[in-house]
Image: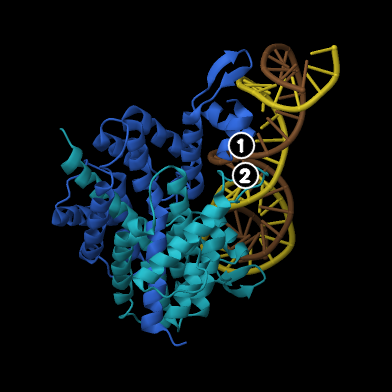
Chain colours: A cyan, B blue, C brown, D yellow
Amino acid sequence: MRISELSRRSGVSIPTIKYYLRDGLLPAGRPTAANQAEYDEDHVRRLRLIRSLIGVRGLSVSATKDVLAAVDEQQGDVHLLLGLVLGALPVERSGRPPRRDGAAEPAGAGAAAGDAAEDVAALTAEMGWKTSPNPPAAQVVAETLETMRALGVDYDWRSLVPYAELADRAARLDLDQLRDAGDPLQQAERAVLLTVLLEPALLALRRLAQEHHSALRFGNG
Amino acid sequence: MRISELSRRSGVSIPTIKYYLRDGLLPAGRPTAANQAEYDEDHVRRLRLIRSLIGVRGLSVSATKDVLAAVDEQQGDVHLLLGLVLGALPVERSGRPPRRDGAAEPAGAGAAAGDAAEDVAALTAEMGWKTSPNPPAAQVVAETLETMRALGVDYDWRSLVPYAELADRAARLDLDQLRDAGDPLQQAERAVLLTVLLEPALLALRRLAQEHHSALRFGNG
DNA sequence: CAGGAGTGGTGAGTGGCACTATCCATTGTA
DNA sequence: TACAATGGATAGTGCCACTCACCACTCCTG
């Protein structure tokens, strides 16, 4: 098929497809002439996957590119694939520059960062989690603890243990679903979907539950 | 204090503080002259809260403004506050324009959207969750289900029940921590922190657990 | 086999966002 | 009284995810 059919089938506009091609998100079609190329079903699948990662999950184009590269390169080894995918993901949203001016962090953030990192180490030890040396995710947790404390909330790693247990169960659920899949490429895609695409849905479920329990406890009408 | 001390105490540059003042994120100081105003501790606290929501959680400035407005207006009623806060939150990241061109959604998304919405209704019924009529969070779940199916993963609401149970427990943990707080303003702030700021940390915990369990199951070195 | 629609490739343009820089008259301060 | 600092305002910056315009070419219909 050619680009207009690819656009129709995927719901992505032609200029956007061209943009993804240019940026290396989508592999080029098989050229049939100087200005003609042939696309196939794989391109449609890939394009839908791209739109899901960017549109539903909100990944940046460059993070999406990294994730897709991991899918392509590590279709066989799920563990390696997940490592690459988790490494490619931004921790909050697309890379935010830490600080350009010389202003100090909220009074002693350096020391607090060290403390928080130790807290996270204690938490992962408590959970028995073995991870790569310095995962970005650990830094997110540390930063959150730090922020909580800077804002006057008395919070340490022990407060997070119950959440960590829930996270542990969620992760096991995730991996349980990676068993039955077809070819390696499809399994790799499924791994990405289950770990990456599910994230907003999980937060949304928590919000629904919060609304429900908040009504139970504090509701007055 | 004046703006330079506010900047030093909060770690936010003076131009940025001015920008927040202009945008209504930060209330104006008490004016003492035509070009002089007095800021206090509340401004420092508010500024740190703003930086946490924008910098750690990644909220947009306008979403942050809405959340802060909810905090200010509904300090007394936690349930009402949470409702406003959850309503003000973006579902994935800052508001993304749905679609500008006339291209169709990936073939039959309209019907799929209806199906997915019914799925979410079934899920919330199963969980016994009572929520407001059409919460944005429910739409996120529906959209995720829809996307999964469009990508060929066999996924329905039953697959989400175990996750919903985890979310239910997480929400109860959240609300348990809203008991002991000082004045209403501090309690409102804590509610925001526990629900909003914790989100990236919870996802990060899941990623750490995923890495651990992935190594257990698929690791080979 | 003419001619218009469609194609790929590329460079430049758009709009939104979160700041950031510059200016100004005025004011506190040494 | 010199001089840095202040508040307020306008304009500019950098980034990002597209989107537009143009071009030489090719396909396809009549």
Q: In the orientation shown, which residue stands out farthest toward the bottom? A: B220
Q: Secondary structure at mark 2?
A: loop
Q: Chain of mark 1?
A: B
Q: Is residue B73 left or right of residue A216?
A: right
Percent from the top left, x then y, of residue B150? Answer: 34, 64
Percent from the top left, x then y, of residue B175? Answer: 25, 47
Residue receiving disc 2 = A104
Instruction: Name the one closer to the observer, A196 or A155.
Output: A155
Percent from the top left, x then y, of residue B196? Answer: 38, 46
As drawn, B136 above or below A33? above
Q: For the residues tagged 1 and 2, is the chain the same?
A: no
Proximity of marks 1 and 2: CB atoms separated by less than 8 Å: yes
Residue receiving disc 1 = B8
User: How many residues crowd mark 2 within 10 Å: few (<14), some (14–19), many (20+)?
Assistant: some
As drawn, A11 above or below A39? above
Q: Is residue A24 left or right of residue A64?
A: right
In the image, what residue occupies the spot 47% across and 34% down? B46
Q: Is residue C26 left or right of residue B97?
A: right
Q: Chain of mark 2?
A: A
Q: Is residue B220 visible?
A: yes
In the image, what residue occupies the spot 23% across and 57% down? B169
Work out how far the residue at label 1 is from the one at label 2, CA to CA, in angstroms: 7 Å
In the image, what residue occupies the spot 55% across and 66% down? A65
Percent from the top left, x then y, of residue B94? Answer: 46, 45
As drawn, D6 above or below A162? above
Query: Mark 1 is on which residue type?
Result: Arg
Q: Quadrant of residue A38?
A: bottom right
Q: Secondary structure at mark 1?
A: helix
